[in-house]
Amino acid sequence: MTLFTGADNEALLVLPVFFEPLRAGEYGCADRALVLIGAARADTLKEFVVSGTAENESGGSLGSCAAEATCSVSGTMMVDVTSSAAFPRGFVTAYDITFPGLAAFDNCCVTQGPLNFESSVWTADSTNNADEVLFLDIPTTHIPASLVGFDGGSINGSVLDPDGEILYFPLSGSITPVPEPSSLALLGGGVLAFTQVRRRKLM
């Protein structure tokens, strides 16, 4: 994913795309291409916290994660939750997910889209700089899967080494929305009001 500045200082988002139109609103695998998808407006993007666990199936220790141990996974994810002409089902614009002992997975995504057109699962797979592969599945409420209006949920998946051997499996966890600044302001105002009322009662 790359950001450029266009006219009026708009952020223009360029990212690898692996899909080609099959019919209205559907995508299939295609060769890698760079596609300019236009202005990346802040009001279309939603930030999420990724957290979960994964079992070390590598046969040895991976950093702080012992063999056969279940260890913590964490990260962040950005999702365009709106429908556009280029991406009618929304899409994952970026993520940065870390596993013990592995380089971060911050190259989203080498492939993404509905698992198939009878499934509610959105796949968003990536590699890291060691060529290890994260297969990430995101259940949605749509069939075929769609991220339009997505507001968080669960994840599952696995991590393989460059030879296809399992490093972590199973991966399971959650995606939780990061509160927007306006929501935080409302929360802060509510706490302040509650504190003032409590003080009055104590006086």
Image (spheres, rainbow, N blue to C red):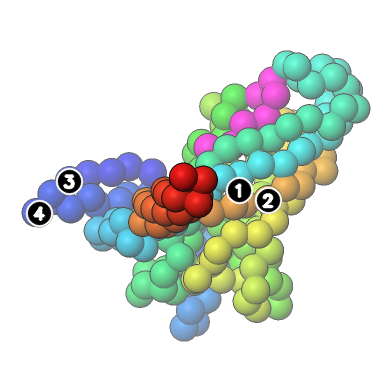
Comparing 21 with 51, the one in front is 51
Q: Label 1: few (<14), some or many (≥20) within 10 Å?
A: many
What is the span of residues highlighted in magenta in the rendered image? 96-102
Percent position of residue 159, x then y: 72, 38
Point out which mark residue 125 bears.
1
Tell me whether circle 2 and circle 1 mark residues in contact (CB < 8 Å).
Answer: no
Residue at 36% x, 63% y is 44
Viewer-proximal residue among 172 and 23: 172
Mark number for residue 5? 3
Can residue 160 be seen at all in this image of the molecule?
Answer: no
What SS does tag 3 mark? strand
Query: At which x and y percent is residue 88?
Result: 44, 74
Amino acid bearing label 3: Thr
Q: Nearer the viewer, residue 161 or 152?
A: 152
**Separation of residues labelled 2 and 3 (CA atoms):** 33 Å
Q: Hey, which residue is sitting farthest front in the picture? A: 203
The residue where tag 4 is placed is: 7
Say which label, 2 or 1, has the lower sequence index.
1
Which kind of residue does numbered mark 4 sit on?
A: Ala
Please identify the residue farthest to the left as the structure is shown.
8
Circle 2 SS class: strand
Residue depth check, mark 4 versus mark 1: number of the one nearer the observer: 4
- Marks 4/3: CA distance? 7 Å
Q: Quadrant of the N terminus?
A: top left
Q: Is residue 10 left or right of residue 65?
A: left
* Tag 2 residue: 174
Examine the rendered structure and indicate whether residue 166 appears above or below residue 64. Answer: below
The image shows residue 137 at horizontal and vertical percentages of 68, 55
Please report contact status of discs 2 and 4: CB closer than 8 Å, yes or no: no
71 lies above or below 194: above
Mark closer to the chain start, 2 or 4: 4
Q: Horizontal placement of 154 versus 55: left or right?
A: left
